[in-house]
Image (cartoon, rainbow, N blue to C red):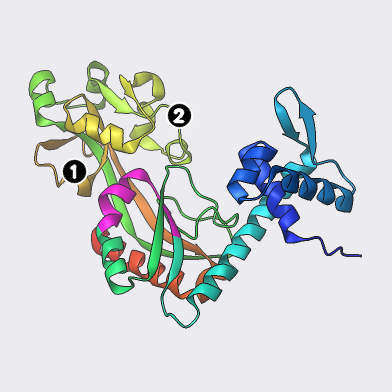
Amino acid sequence: MTKNIAWEYYRSLLAVLTHGSLSAAARALGITQPTVGRHVAALEQELGVALFTRSQQGLLPTEVALALRPHAQAMAHTASLMERAAGSAGQGVAGVVRISASEVVGVEVLPPILARLRERHPALVVELVLSNQVQDLLRREADIAVRMVPPRQERLVMRKVGVIEVGLFAHRDYLARHGEPQHTEDLASHALIGYDLPSPLVRGIAGAWQALSRERFSLCCDSDLAQMALICAGAGIGGCQVLLAAREPALQRVLPDAFTLPLETWVTMHEDLRSSLGCRAAFDALVEGLQDYTA
C-alpha cells in the first residue's frame, strides 16, 4: 500500500544530503534543527530504513539515502514549478527560468540575447548557471541548457541552432617572438594552453586534436575564460571559438587545416516545461539568438 508521506520529510532529507548536517539544513530551509531531525527520523520510520549513520565526520548518508536523492531533487523541482505556475498565473511571461551554458558562451554570447529577452519580458527572472559540466535536465539541475554536444537523454525538447567552430589561436606578439608553426610537429617547441582535467567534450575529440594531450600543455586550466585570457595575453597557443577570435584583431589562427573542431550547438529543455510561458519564451529567445550568432 502506498503511504502518504509528507513532502516536507523529503525536503528535509534533501537539505541534509545537500548541506551535510542538520544545522546547515535547518539554516537553508529556515526552520529549526530539531524540526529537521524529526522529519528525517519520521521518514526513516515510515520507510523502515536507516538514512544516515553518525560518525566523527558527522552524518553519513546510507546507500538508501543516496538512492532517494535524485527523486527528492525531482520532487523539489516539481514543487518549484508549481510555485512558479501559481505565481505567474494571469501575469503572462513571468517567474524564474534557470539556464545552463558553458563559461565562454555564457559570458561572450548570451548576455545580449538575455538582455533582449528581459526587455520583452521584464517580469521574467533569469538564473544563469555557468559550467563546463553538462547539467542534467532530467534531474532538474537547470530548466534550459545550451550544449555543445548532441543531447542523448529522452524526454527533452531540443533544437540544433548551428555549428560553432573552434580552432587554434595565438596573439600576434607571441608569434612574433616564437615564430608561427607550419606543421603539427612544430607545436612541440611552443607553449600550449589547455585543460587540466578532461571534460566529456575533450574525451570525445578526435583527429589532430588528440595530439594536444594533457602532458603537452605548458599552461593548464579548466576555465575556458582563463584559457582565452591567456591566449589574448600572448602566453601561448590554445583553442578558441573562431567567431570570438574574430572580435580580437590581435589574435591569429594557426594550423587551420589540421586543427578545426565544428561543435554542434543545441538548446534543450525538459518536455514538462513546455507549458511554462517563461521557459518557452526563454527557449525561443535562445534559439533565435544563437541561430543569428552561428549564421
Whether residue 199 is situated above or below residue 55 in the rendered picture? below
Q: Nearer the viewer, residue 162 or 232?
A: 232
Q: Nearer the viewer, residue 55 or 249?
A: 55
Magenta span of residues = 98-111
Residue 67 in view here:
no
CA distance for labels 1 and 2: 24 Å
Residue 240 in view here:
yes
Report whether 18 appears left or right of 202.
Answer: right
Provide the secondary structure element on which disc 1 rests: helix
Residue at image coords 87%, 64%: 2
Residue 123 location, quadrant: bottom left
Q: How many numbered badges does the structure rendering display? A: 2
Q: Main secondary structure of the magenta part?
A: helix
Residue 22 location, quadrant: top right
x and y, in percent, of residue 255 in the image: 21, 34
Report whether 200 appears left or right of 218.
Answer: right
Decide: few, some or many residues near mark 2? Use Cα within 10 Å; few <14, some 14-19, many ≥20. few
What residue is disc 2 on?
197
Residue at image coords 65%, 46%: 15
Query: Of callouts 1 and 2, which one flags the residue occurring earlier in the amino acid sequence?
Result: 2
Direction bottom: furthest residue: 90
Direction top: furthest residue: 189
Quadrant position of the C terminus in the picture: bottom left
Q: Amino acid at mark 1?
A: Ala
Report whether 117 appears left or right of 234.
Answer: right
What residue is disc 1 on?
245
